[in-house]
Every structure is written in C-alpha cells, then in structure tokens.
Image: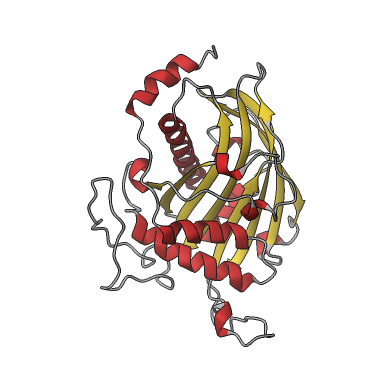
Amino acid sequence: MNRFAPLALIFCLACELPPAADPEFSDAASFTFLQFDSEQPADLAFAMRALEQELYLAVDIDAEDAEDRALSPAALTDADLEALPDRPDRPAENLRSVTVIKPSAYATADHQGYILLDDQVPVEPSSPNHYDRSFEDGLDCWPTQGCDFLRTENLLTKENIAIGEITYTLFKDYRWIDLNLPDPSSVPEGETPVNEGDKRWGLAARSWTNEVAFNAAEDRSIQQSFSIEVWIPRDGAGYVRSSDDVNGDTLAGEQGTWTQDSDGAGALRMLTLWSENDIGSEVDEGFEVRLLRNGIDGIFDAQEEWMDAN
C-alpha cells in the first residue's frame, strides 16, 4: 500500500463534493476553454464576459472557506479537446472537475510578475521542491502586451498525500484579451471586430498534459489534466448587478444573498481543473476533489503572498 494511503483514508471521512454548477456556468467555462486559441479575439472576449457574470452569480467570492467558493463544472468532451496539439490517449468521460473562484487585491497586469518566473516553486505550494518553467514563445513581446500569447513548457514534481511524488511536463499558455471587444454577432459578416474605445485587459491561461505520468513505484499516476484560468478586472466596467439577477443556490439549498459584481478592486480569479488521476481504490472521489480544490486555493494564496512581497 502506498505510504500516504492511511492519511487519505482519515481525511476522506469529512469529504463533500462541491455543488454542481448551473448549466450557464458550465457552458461559459468550457466555452472559454474552447475559444482560448481562437483566431478572432472577440470570440474569447465574449466567452469571458459570459463567464464573468456567471462567476459573480454562482458563489460568494468573499467566502473564507474554499468550499464555499467552489463548483463542480460539467466535464469536457473528447470533441472539446481535439484542438490541443497533443494529449494522452484517455477518454474525456473519465475526467473529474472542480472550479475555485477568489478575488485578488491586485490588478490583472500585476499577476504577470510571477507568471514570468523561471522557478515557479514560490507560487506553487503543491510543487515545493521542483517547478521549472521555460518560455517557448512570446517572452520578448507578451509582458508589454506587444503580442497576445505567452507559451510555456513546465517540468515539475507534484507532491501530495494521494500521489506521493510525480514528475511530469505541463504545457501552459497565457493570452491577453481585450474584454471590451464587441460581440461577434454585432459585427457585419466579413468585418473584423474592433474596439475603438478604452481597452479592458483580461487574462486567460490554458494548460494540458500530453502523456500519463507515474510515481516511482508506478502505483499512482496523473492520467490527464486540463485547465482554464482567468483574471478579470474588478473595475466597474464589466458585469454590474441588476435587480433582475438571481444568485445560485448554496449548499443549504437556498438562493445566495451575496451582492458582489465587477464594481470592486483588483481582479477576479477563477481556475477550473479537469483531471483524471489514479490514486488508489482506497481514496474516494470526495477526497480527491477536496484535495484538488484546496490545492487550487493554496496556489491563489501563494501567488497573492508573492505579490505582497514583491
């Protein structure tokens, strides 16, 4: 038995799955994933604006506990993943999913500081000893928004009580996006959507693995992993709540009473992870999702602390 398994059995006693996401949120999250590489930036801008509204309606973004800021979005499909250059030969139906949402005190552009680190260990608590980032394209122009994309390849070792230690390669791309681009449907056919007013810069990132990765004993593995991440300004220029808007239901089965929208400060953050892991039959789904959820929230906290210090 894996030496971490007894701890996993202890922790899974208190595990609960996040509430299922409303269809609108699930559609917006997967649509953002699909539109990440679109040749028309307005497509991604449209997806992120829809996602922005659903995030504010879905959860209380200021809740202290990550469980209250988490959702279980719909799974991706094999068709959704066809656009990736390479991925493990695993069915998408095996993926488990979790979303965590959290506000940041820092503006979207401030977050590029840690994105540009060669050594990601300071901002990746799940990889406390090894996380090396190399820049494949865009390093000379992306930091100044001279180009849309920053493409990275990452060699890292993930460590936790479920998998032990697994070293693998993760591809992660970042993209600036002007959220004030017009809706594609409002632009005459054949014309390129153009924003002639003020820019509202958001940021999106998409990651994926291209092969199954095992621990040293080959009894635990990361089968496949995909994510979409967004940073959206809280500048009052995005989604603003109206009296007709209805919040999602809470774990208690009641409509939430939170009132937040884009009229705030800093940025709104979201990371949705779809993953398949072999962590042993003695670990239940609730424990695995809780581990993923708390891992994402820990990353948010570590990145915020890095910006505090730098």
48 above or below 100? below
- Quadrant location of the N terminus in the rendered image: top right
Q: Position of residue 124 (x, y in %)?
A: 56, 37
Residue 5, position as x, y percentages in the image: 48, 17
The residue nearer to you, when weighing 119 against 269, is: 269
What residue is rendered at 44% in x and 27% in y? Answer: 284
Q: Decide if residue 169 is in sight here.
A: yes
Q: Is residue 284 above or below residue 231?
A: above
| Residue 215 image position (x, y, % from top left) | 65, 22
Colouring: secondary structure
Left or right placement of residue 297 versus residue 153 in this view: left
What residue is drawn where x is 53% and y is 22%?
A: 280
In screen coordinates, is 254 left or right of 261? left
Above or below 234: residue 190: below
- Is residue 106 visible to us here? no
Residue furthest to the bottom? 188
Q: Residue 266 at what x, y percent from top left? A: 43, 59
Q: Residue at x 24, y 56 (%)?
A: 255
Residue nearest the observer in this picture, 237 or 43: 43
Residue 260 sits in which quadrant?
A: bottom left
**Foreground pick, 107 / 182:** 182
282 horizontally vs 147: left or right: left
- The correct choice, above or below, for 125 with respect to 152 in the image is above
Nearest the eye: 11 or 305? 11
What number of labels is visible?
A: 0
